[in-house]
Each structure stands twice: as C-alpha cells, then as structure tokens.
Image (tube, grey):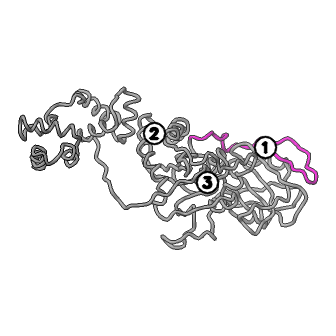
Amino acid sequence: MEQFEELYIEVEAGRLGCADAAMILGCSPRHFLRLRCRYDEDGFEGLRDRRVGRVSRHRAADEEVERLARLYRDRYAGFNIRHFCELARRDHGLQRGYTWMRLALLRAGLVQAEARGGKHRLKRPRKPMRGMMMHQDASTHRWFGEGYADLVVTLDDATSEIASAFFCAQEGTGSSLRGIHETISKHGLFCALYTDRGSHYFTTPEVGGKVDKSRPTEVGRALRQLGIDHIAAYSPEARGRSERAFGTLQGRLVNELKLAGICDMAAANRYLREDYLPRHNAQFAVAPELEASAFVAVPGFDIDNILCIQEDRVVGADNTVRYKGMTLQIPPSPFRHHYVKVRVRVHHYPRRQPGDLPWPPRNRPLPPRRHMPQPGPGRSARLQPAPGRLRLRLRQPCADRNRAMKPIGHLSRQSIGHLHSSSTRYGVMRWLFSKKKAAPGSIQDWG
C-alpha cells in the first residue's frame, strides 16, 4: 500500500510514467491504471482484492464433496489418491481433477499429507536399450488375505516394463531362477541383472561388506553359464527403480486384489498375470531412448538345465542317491553293471507355484515306455518328458562346476518304466549322472 502511494504521488507530479510505476509494482500498465482509478474513487479500500469473500462460480456443491468422501470411505479406503482419482473418473463418472480430489480428501481427514524432503541424490540415467539391464527384487507385504507373501518382480531398466512378476511364500533361489527363466522365455537373454546382496544372490563374507564373486551361489552360477553379468547393489537407494515400482504396486495391487475379493495365492497370481500386469505396463512403462533391443532370442536352447539347483552327490552301494530326505533309485543299465561310488550331479527344478499351469497328478507310477531300438554311434535316443516328472542324463564330470558336464552315454528306455513320480514332491527334478570312463553314445532323456 505504501509503495503504491509513493509511486502514485510521483506519477501525479509527472516525475514518473505509468509504465515505469507498473514495472516497479510488477504488474501491467493497464492494471496500474485500474488501481489508480480505484484509489481516486475509494482511497486505500479501492485497492483491496474484490474477489475476497466472494464464492467462486467453479466451487463444487456440498453434495458432490460428500459423495466423493462417502465413495472413498466406503469402497476405496486405503487407496492412494492418484489411483482413487483414476478409478473415480473411470468407473463412477466423476469429472474433477486430481488436485481437487486430493484437497477434498485432505479437508475431510480421509488421507494424510505425505512428508517431503530427504537427502539430495543424483538420478542415474536409464539404459538406452531394452534388455541391457534387468532389476530383480522381492517385497514382503500383506498383498491378499490376512497373511504375508512375497512378490518377486523382474523389470527392465530402460522402460520399467515388468517382464516377470508372481507371488510366492518366500523368496529364495527357486523364485529368483523362476523370474529369470520367465524373462528369458518371453524376451530372450539379457546383458546384466541388478539385485540386492541377499544370500541367494551373493556370498558376503562380512556383514555389510563386499560380495565374494569367486564363490557364486546357484543364481550366480546360472547367470555365469548364461553369460549374464550380475551386479550387486549396496543400498536401497541404488535400487531406486525397483523400489519405486514396489511403491506403486503396494499402493495399487493390494487394493485391486481386495476389490476383486481375492484371498488365495493361486487366484492372486492369475489376476496378476492376466489382468493387472498388462494394464500396469501400458500405463507406467516408458519408451526407451533407442528402439533397438539388446535381448537375444534363444529358440530351442535348453535353459532348464542351467536355471536349476545343482548339487553333487556320490552314488551309494545300493545304486541310490540321497537328496533332501529322498532316496532316488537309479534303474539298471545295459552299459554299466552298477553306478556305485560314481559322482553324480542332481538337478533340482524349482517347484511350481499356485496359480501356474497344473502338473499331472503326483504319486502315481510312470506309464510303461514302448520299446525303441538302441541308438547307433553318434546318435541319441530321446524320450519326450512329461511335465512334472523326472529326466535322466549321463554326463562326464567336469572340474569347473560353472560349465555344463560333457555327455558320454545313455540309458535304456525299458529300464525306466517302473520309477514312480513320488520323488517329485520337491518339484520337477532331473538327474545328471556321470561315468568315469567314456563310452559310445549320447544323451538319454526320460520323462
């Protein structure tokens, strides 16, 4: 007020122009002339904003505000404001914007304002191409029902597209291998995997210290065989891309599962795979800097024998192998009298989770196999394995456990028809047996 009065006196005395006075006040010359006329008529009262105390013509009716609050309170309690705004506009015909709904819910006390601030960090640029780096992480949360479950997510750094996501009871080696397998099956081999330092990803000799890549875990061994770099993150902030994705999932997926009345893992995995993920990727995935892809397709490449748990055993005197409380019987073979004291590598394939395609019934004998002539030199007799059963391969031991074992022999098809699938209670298993001396033949799979 005082500054306007001083400028008004200078303008009236002719020592200052209206344009200069408007520049000092930070307004247009036209507005300064409007204020000058009001000051001449009403004095300082004429300078007050005449909109103060007047009801805006855009103000919503009390009934609309009450309808919004009742809708959120009765049906969408716990939804984040952005998600609620999208559903209210899509399913209930509300036309108000995000800011209006946010302020209305804040005034009604139905949501709380989020705290702002934190340490200043520099944003790491995304990779320019799809498939250059994938993030994998898991989040323990009350996703559905009353109990807790883990959501394992594998997403692309370049686009934030979720390539694999599923619920499991607890994350571990099996869930990590499954996420990698689903990603490779869908898109192809990628360049690098970025994970935390969990015990199923890395061996860490000291708590909070550097990882020891010379002692790979099963996940590290599988990635090394596939030629995928494994990168360790040393702080949650370093995994910001996946942490923000979990924030979005916890704010949306939990409420959508609740809205759909889903309380079991099988239904949750089915809803996640068939309904939620396509909409999530369409809304939140971004375009990469380059349209080219770093994924490498591997048609016909057997990644199952790499993305599995491999453990070495020695065959007992009764031609059996002990593994996780099970006794695995090796059937007779015409190419060797017995397998006693032979070093064996057991391949344990992760158990399928609820919501996946069902396996055939367990604990029933395998059907007898038709007779097939023995393969000649340089040829391989192969049986097509049925899902959920066992596969046996003969391999030559190799000093480097990170490399595949050399195939050196085969078993007869007639000797495997009496093995029962009750040993598959830990998941689909495949054995790789080795012979100390090379013998003619190739690989024999059995299902």
In the rendered image, which quarter is residue 395 located in? bottom right
> Marks 3/1: CA distance?
34 Å
Q: Where is residue 119 in the image (x, y as percent from the top left)?
A: 37, 61
Is residue 98 on the magenta stretch?
Answer: no
Tell me which amino acid carries mark 3: Met
Circle 2 sits in a helix, a strand or a loop, which is it? loop
In the rendered image, which quarter is residue 440 located in? bottom right
- Circle 2 is placed at which residue position? 263
Magenta range: 355-383
Q: Where is residue 238 in the image (x, y as percent from the top left)?
A: 48, 60
- Circle 1 is placed at which residue position? 384
> Marks 3/2: CA distance?
36 Å
Q: In this view, does 277 lie to the left or right of 371?
A: left
Q: In this view of the protein, which residue sits in the foreground, 244 or 78?
A: 244
Q: Which residue is drawn at 52% across and 44% down?
A: 286
Circle 1 sits in a helix, a strand or a loop, which is it? loop
> Marks 2/1: CA distance?
37 Å
Q: Nearer the viewer, mark 3 or mark 2?
A: 3
Is residue 424 in view? no
- Circle 3 is placed at which residue position? 132
